[in-house]
Image (cartoon, rainbow, N blue to C red):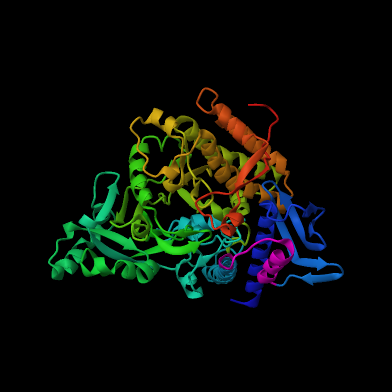
Amino acid sequence: MTATHQYKADQMIQYRVLLACMKEALFPAATHITVEKGDVRIRYRQHMLYVRYTIKSAFYQITMDGPITYSVANEVQEIQSLRTLIDVLMRHFDIGFHERLIEELEHSVLGLSLSYRQYEHRETAMRHALKFSRMPSELNFIAWLTHMGEDHHFSALGYTEGMVWHGHPSHPLTKTKLPLTSDDIQAYAPEFMRVVPLNIVLVKETVLHETAMNGDSNFVLNKVVPDMKRKLQQYLEPYEAELEAYRVLFVHPWQYEHVVVQQFKDNIQAHTVIPTPFTVEAKATLSFRTMYLLNRPYHIKLPVNVQATSAVRTVSTVTTVDGPNLSYQLQPLLNEFPTLQVALEPYGAYIDAPADVARQFAMIVRQSPEKDVTEMTQLVTACLIERNPVDKQVVVDSLIEYVYGDVNATTIATFIREYSRALVIPLIAYIQRYGIALEAHQQNTVLEVNKADQTFSFIVRDLGGARIDLPTLQRAIPNVVVTNTSLIAENIEAVIAKFQHAVIQNQLGTLIHHFKHVYKSDEQALYDIVSDVIHEAIDDTQSHAVALKRVLFGERVIVKALLNMRMNQQVKQYMNVALDNPLYEKKVY
């Protein structure tokens, strides 16, 4: 890691902290804030913070530039580090940062600086690879992905999971992974695309709670690793035990070393948990704890007792039950639309222990969203606003160039319309027909580009992030059972708000911000296209049409106050802030 990477990462987290303090109204009430003519000025009593910005767009997205300065009276100080900024905010602007939060923010700087360095390494390696393969140096990134995808050993989706250099588009804790060391980050974070050997552990059936979508309680052995049956049986022979009495669980190697061998040592001594010397090869997806198995059509969601962004990434026991149960109960409903599919979760398991312990030793098996490479090129949508190491463009620009031939006002508008129609129309239909809002934000959504006609479709993964209006779902599936109460929304408005946050703000908002920043696009014209698509999607003859219009076209929208939640050490209880809605319509619904 060079000083340049460190400085660049530190400054980026400074921007995010300052922006979060503004957006979440963390400054004292008497503070005067102006954002105009390229200047941000924050004045409290005689103290002032100042920074330049290059663009401001909806949902309080502001791209800052250059150093932040602090002034009081005639004294002007250029902020040199995140620690200095936090000190100024605490001493002169009465904003409270506890020591743990400061540690988390500084760890985010570490992770981001390593990510910047990795991009530089990837770019250098790509330049040499293109030179020696005699491929054209101006090769379009999507064309390169499509070409590479012809090799069955290459995963286009896996490659894009590992190139989200900035992580969450606005969270100050975007790259926090405490307590991982620098070496750990490089071994396990998705940007580094390292092979991670998942430990295979055998757990006695009598101490395991398991849920299988198809009734096969031995799903992992029968479907995921059937080639390992003989090895595992032979390994069990000295224990005088039969493989049928055990179940296969995967354990992340960090979790195995730091949690499982310590917290579950009594189970290991009693042979109800038997570690084996065997592993399966995997790589991290963008969600860090969810691993995609190499050459096996499954993803595995695993607990890793690490704080990634705001939360410690274990696996809730109820999600191991609801994933398979909902996959089974919703299966007939989840493939109704050709442009949107859902990755099912056929199996989940957790060890018999109190819930706060069991969540450290659990697992969910998810069907891999990867399709036949001859038909589709797949990208995780979070990569669309990141720079790629092939043509060095932002990925969405490479995509528009690939599909439409050029990036201009017309092709950007066409892209926003086609992208929105493929994603928004089915998601709103799920809300109206079944009361389900899938959490289709950039981390959970896979974009598919059809190789034959360049049309778009999507796959959404992670049923655990959905929100459900139970009365609506019960009309479609009278006997539906939802174990995880956090999935059940208090009303249909909360379901719609989940869609609004994940899709309108997180997906489309960040794309439109990019187009405004780089191409000076007419921001409101692009949101008008989104508005047209939403009107097209809402069926006035179906349930919740009025509620959808009231929430989606209301004057204000609700945004999670991510920094404030960490200041108050609240992860599960949301704190929100209201922002102006670019889709606002003055009609009364």
**Horizontal placement of 10 versus 74: left or right?**
left
Q: Where is residue 574? Give x, y as percent.
A: 55, 49
Residue numbers of the magenta segment: 81-101
Q: Where is residue 260? Give x, y as percent.
A: 33, 67
Q: How many marks?
A: 0
Q: Where is residue 466? Give x, y as percent.
A: 46, 43
- Residue drawn 70% across and 67% down? 85
Q: Where is residue 158? Give x, y as percent.
A: 46, 58
The answer to whether residue 88 is magenta is yes
Q: Residue furthest right?
A: 74
Quadrant including the N terminus: bottom right
Tell me, yes or no, if residue 169 can be seen here: no
The answer to whether residue 359 is magenta is no
Q: Residue furthest left?
A: 240
Q: Which is nearer the eye, 380 or 309?
A: 309
Q: Which is nearer the eye, 578 or 434?
A: 578
Q: Which is nearer the eye, 459 or 403?
A: 459
Tell me the quarter of the picture where residue 302 sits. bottom left
- Residue drawn 66% across and 41% down? 413
- Residue drawn 31% across and 67% down? 279
Main SS, magenta region, reads helix
